[in-house]
Image (cartoon, helix red, strand yellow):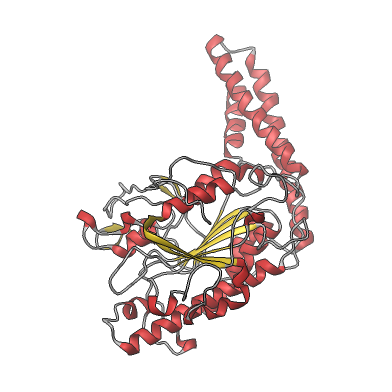
């Protein structure tokens, strides 16, 4: 009995340690319940606001002109819409005082007010990407993908009494659990596609499945032999456990139906020294994850709010955060315009990659997706959280209306946009964050 129980517990430990496998649905699958290819959604974040006078488009509707710092996006004008007039009310100071950069990062995808603490008692709200992941994430190997260029920081104080968890995490699984992003391209690649070349990755994948099945066989055989020696209550507990084991077995069976994607890209060496190379390599991986249907939901923080990166390659040696407090000095503002344009070029690179990638219906990933490009501040000098710089790219398979400047009146909660996007993704909610209703006209 002791030996059997010891073996059983060893098997139990092995089964509990198994990762959860997600099934990969067929390529042609539901599109928000409307049929057609699956939709993808991505959320790209840029820090420290923009110089609004050089950002705001001229005119509204379809007859509008891109302003100076959005010129790199001109070739993709039919594929995105600029949305003006969105606000995150919970980003403003209120009674919490300083800490606008932490609040900008925290509110951008949650619409919730972060609890002001630098300790372990962080509290925010679930982010829009994770609401979608909870609804549709089971259809892909990875429910969501979180990327960044900054190293992960989940504790300690970062901005005027706010935890670093708020400032370095866009995605939140729950009110107290951030989804830590990965900033190392090689680790992202290996997570998505495995270690080694294409042949080695496929061999290792098959071995992992076989190994997990052998562990399950051991656990089930050992558990069944133990059942006759248990009392009534223990047999009930064992039956519950075996049910759990059977569920794991079913997940493995579904995973066996999945074929590891064949990718031409080789595993990156690590983090590039040049910031732009780093950004673009992460974009390549994000698009590849969508193209192989490894996930349909992703977040990418190009830099955390309050970032003080310098941009020497474009003639800006001062830090971004330092320059954002420009006090209306023309020289500093001109350097900020260069930084804003730099980020617009990175977004143009993303749109180019998405447009070039063909989906199962012959259209582009850009057509069958929606991507939010935004900052949690509008004016970094004055720390404003209204009239946020927001671009919504993609057609969502025809559900969205790009090719225009949507100029909203008053101050519209950005959470209203998320209610609409969640509905398009097939994850409808009545409320999200501080929403007052869906933003229908997008």
Q: Report the front residue among 408 and 277.
A: 408
**What is the x, y in percent for residue 156?**
31, 58
Identify the residue at horizontal 34%, vertical 90% (top origin): 331
Q: Report the front residue among 307 and 344.
A: 344
**What is the x, y in percent for residue 139?**
66, 44
Q: Report the front residue among 403 and 187.
A: 403
Identify the residue at horizontal 69%, vertical 42% (top origin): 23
Q: Is residue 316 left or right of residue 285?
A: left
**What is the x, y in percent for residue 207?**
75, 47
Q: How many marks?
A: 0
**What is the x, y in percent for residue 210?**
75, 42
Depicted 216 relative to depicted 437: above or below: above
Is residue 194 something that shows in the picture? Answer: no
Q: Report the front residue among 386 and 242.
A: 386
Is residue 103 something that shows in the picture? Answer: yes
Q: Is residue 214 left or right of residue 151?
A: right
Identify the residue at horizontal 68%, vertical 68% (top origin): 355
The image quarter containing residue 380 is bottom left
Depicted 86 relative to depicted 350: above or below: above
| Name of the residue lying farthest toward the top | 232
The N terminus - image quarter = top right
Identify the residue at horizontal 62%, vertical 49% (top origin): 142
């Amino acid at each position: 009995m002791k030996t059997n129980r010891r073996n059983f517990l060893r098997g139990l430990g092995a089964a509990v340690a198994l990762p959860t496998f997600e099934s990969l649905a067929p390529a042609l699958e539901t599109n928000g319940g409307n049929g057609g290819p699956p939709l993808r959604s991505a959320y790209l974040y840029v820090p420290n606001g923009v110089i609004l006078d050089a950002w705001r488009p001229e005119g509204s509707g379809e007859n509008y002109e891109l302003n100076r710092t959005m010129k790199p996006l001109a070739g993709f004008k039919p594929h995105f819409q600029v949305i003006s007039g969105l606000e995150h009310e919970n980003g403003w100071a209120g009674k919490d005082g300083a800490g606008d950069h932490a609040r900008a990062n925290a509110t951008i995808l949650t619409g919730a007010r972060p609890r002001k603490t630098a300790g372990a008692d962080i509290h925010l709200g679930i982010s829009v990407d994770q609401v979608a992941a909870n609804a549709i994430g089971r259809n892909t190997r990875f429910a969501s993908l979180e990327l960044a260029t900054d190293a992960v920081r989940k504790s300690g104080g970062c901005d005027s009494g706010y935890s670093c968890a708020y400032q370095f995490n866009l995605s939140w699984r729950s009110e107290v659990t951030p989804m830590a992003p990965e900033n190392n391209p090689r680790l992202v690649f290996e997570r998505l596609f495995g270690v080694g070349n294409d042949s080695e990755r496929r061999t290792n994948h098959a071995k992992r499945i076989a190994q997990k099945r052998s562990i399950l066989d051991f656990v089930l055989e050992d558990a069944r032999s133990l059942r006759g020696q248990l009392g009534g209550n223990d047999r009930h507990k064992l039956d519950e456990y075996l049910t759990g084991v059977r569920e794991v077995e079913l997940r493995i069976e579904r995973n066996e139906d999945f074929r590891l994607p064949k990718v031409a890209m080789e595993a990156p060496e690590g983090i590039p020294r040049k910031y732009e190379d780093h950004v673009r390599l992460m974009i390549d991986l994000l698009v590849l994850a969508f193209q192989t249907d490894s996930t349909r939901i992703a977040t990418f923080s190009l830099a955390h709010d309050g970032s003080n990166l310098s941009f020497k390659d474009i003639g800006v040696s001062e830090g971004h955060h330092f320059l954002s407090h420009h006090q209306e000095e023309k020289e500093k503002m001109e350097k900020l315009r260069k930084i804003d344009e730099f980020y617009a070029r990175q977004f143009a690179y993303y749109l180019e990659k998405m447009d070039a990638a063909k989906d199962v219906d012959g259209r582009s990933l850009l057509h069958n997706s929606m991507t939010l490009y935004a900052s949690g501040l509008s004016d970094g000098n004055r720390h404003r959280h209204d009239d946020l710089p927001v671009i919504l790219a993609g057609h969502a398979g025809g559900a969205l209306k790009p090719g225009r400047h949507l100029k909203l009146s008053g101050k519209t909660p950005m959470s209203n946009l998320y209610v609409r996007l969640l509905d398009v993704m097939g994850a409808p909610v009545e409320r999200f964050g501080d929403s007052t209703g869906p933003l229908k006209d997008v």
